[in-house]
Image (spheres, rainbow, N blue to C red):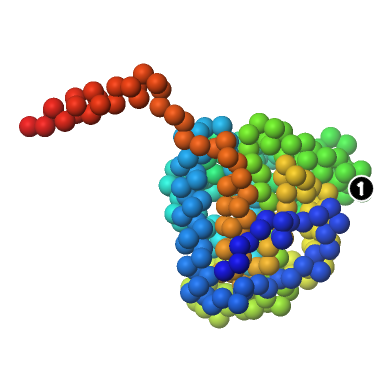
Amino acid sequence: MKSIQPEDYRASSDVVLKENRTYQDFELDKKDLKEELQRVRKKLGDFQNTMYAHGKYAVLICLQGMDTAGKDSLVREVFKDFNARGVVVHSFKVPTELERDHDYLWRHYIALPARGKFGVFNRTHYENVLVTRVHPEYILGENLPGVESVADIDEAFWDRRFDQINDFERHLAENGTLVFKFFLHISKEEQRQRLLRRLRLKHKHWKFSPGDLEERKLWDLYMDCYQDAIRRTTHDHAPWFVVPADNKNAARVIVASILWEALNKYKDIVEPELDEKIRANIAEYKQQLENEKE
């Protein structure tokens, strides 16, 4: 298939989501897309091994999207060929009491990947300018100084929060974390079909919540908030990519390919050379081990 380039999906600061496609298949069937994913994810797994040995970079992958966008299955399929110790996934739910006792970025900061590892945020710090913007009453639970009612949450509040998020990601990038942010862009009709599937299939029932239908009524507001968040926070050091997600198999290939094409450009990420003294004595070390044969 044609090589996928990150720039084809990278969001600009004036992105218009309704102008971005939600479906892609590259004129390939399900089997071909799965084979392409297998090819790319193997290269990503090998890259992570090299990155671990190199020891100077980490990779943070942020996944956002409406309910049913396919975040969970994407994580499962894209990182299947990784060393299990090389990738750490965090799914952020409603903040716990402990998390609410800290600032909203704290729980994300302590979950960041160590150097040499991939970290995946399944839902991210952006929930704090998405869900809370649609439901500003949730901010009251953060117990912030000067915020006593929803009336105190004005545009200046959101401006400051976007500045904080941009500063957070800039700090990460300047200290060796490569940040990639993906918006899994599904259509409202595709979400309807996926919700129906959860109701039709008994083994999918556990995924359904009546709250999904209430949030669906706010679709247009969510799209406005996503668009604004992406516009304000897509930068060279932490780019957003808008991924058509109506076709799950194609979406997985796109995400994996973007990661591979971008990471493969870091030519300084190589396995370190052996210490000169060790290299000079390799033959001796081999001989010692071979002499241990019974």
Q: How many marks?
A: 1
Name above or below for residue 189 compared with residue 114. Answer: below
- Quadrant, the N terminus: bottom right
Q: Residue at x 84, y 63 (%)?
A: 16
Give the left or right position of residue 257, taking residue 226 as reference. Answer: left
Q: Residue at x 19, y 27 (%)?
A: 287
Q: Residue at x 61, y 36 (%)?
A: 110
Q: Position of residue 140 (x, y in %)?
A: 80, 46
Identify which residue, 264 or 21, lies in the foreground: 264
Identify which residue, 225 or 273, lies in the foreground: 273
Task: State the SS at label 1.
Answer: helix
Identify which residue, 8 or 64, lies in the foreground: 8
Q: Residue furthest top?
A: 277
Name above or below for residue 50 compared with residue 66. Answer: above
Give the left or right position of residue 262, taking residue 47 as reference. Answer: right
Q: Position of residue 118 (x, y in %)?
A: 54, 44
Q: Position of residue 247 (x, y in %)?
A: 61, 72
Q: Which residue is mark 1?
A: 155
Q: Residue at x 56, y 61 (%)?
A: 74
Q: Amino acid at mark 1?
A: Glu
